[in-house]
Image (cartoon, grey):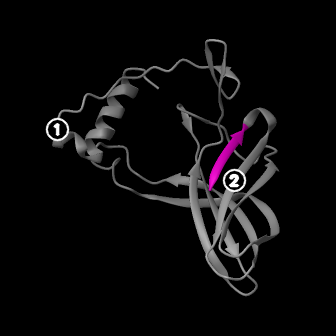
Amino acid sequence: TYIKPLVDKDELEVEITVKNTTNKEAKINLNADIYRWINKTGKSIIEIPEINWSLGEKAMSFSNKKLVVAPNSTQTFIFKTKVNGALDLWSPSSPNLYGLILSINGKKQTLDKDYTRFGWRQFNIKGEQLFLNGESFQVKGDSWHFMGIPQMTRRYAYSWYQMLLDNNAN
């Protein structure tokens, strides 16, 4: 599953690659539901690195698609839909995220599910200028100079990230 947020067109495009490993033609329906991604971590350096999230209310859905995948083959399908204000923009100062759950259904059962987290945002380059969601954007960051095992923890990474935020990096 590859998600393409096309903010300038108010369009969400989802590219799905399906593999049929059987010797029979597969008749499937693809259904996609998008839910608000809710971060439930705390605010302290001890709590932040702990993985703690859930999916909230449904923001939008894609209508069913009746598709056929040839035997022993891989095929790519593309969903496109208008967003019409259903998703909030992502930015470093407002990191709104969503979870897309894609279901591949046969006649009587769900054959597979795939989950992908994404943000409704679009970067563009015009000339020498970078834009985020149509507005000029300057990246302010730092490089991480790896110095060994202590830096391989989630707590260290989150501490470093917080330090950058405290110093107006984005």
Magenta residue span: 1-6
- Which amino acid type corresponds to the residue marked 2 in the rendered image? Glu
Q: Quadrant of the N terminus?
A: bottom right
Single out the residue that lies furthest toward the top.
Answer: 128
Q: What distance separates the C-alpha of mark 2 from that of mark 1? A: 38 Å
Q: What residue do we see at 35% from left, 47% from top?
A: 48
Residue 2: percent from left, percent from top:
63, 51
Residue 2 among magenta residues: yes
Q: What residue do we see at 66% from left, 41% from top?
A: 120
Please report whichever mark, 2 or 1, sits nearer to the chain's N-terminal start. 2
Q: Which mark is residue 15?
A: 2
The residue at which mark 1 appears reads as 148
| Residue 27 higher or lower than 61, as above or below | below
State left or right for residue 94 relative to residue 108: left
**Which residue occupies the foreground of this view, 123 or 43?**
123
Residue 154 among magenta residues: no
Q: Secondary structure at mark 1?
A: loop
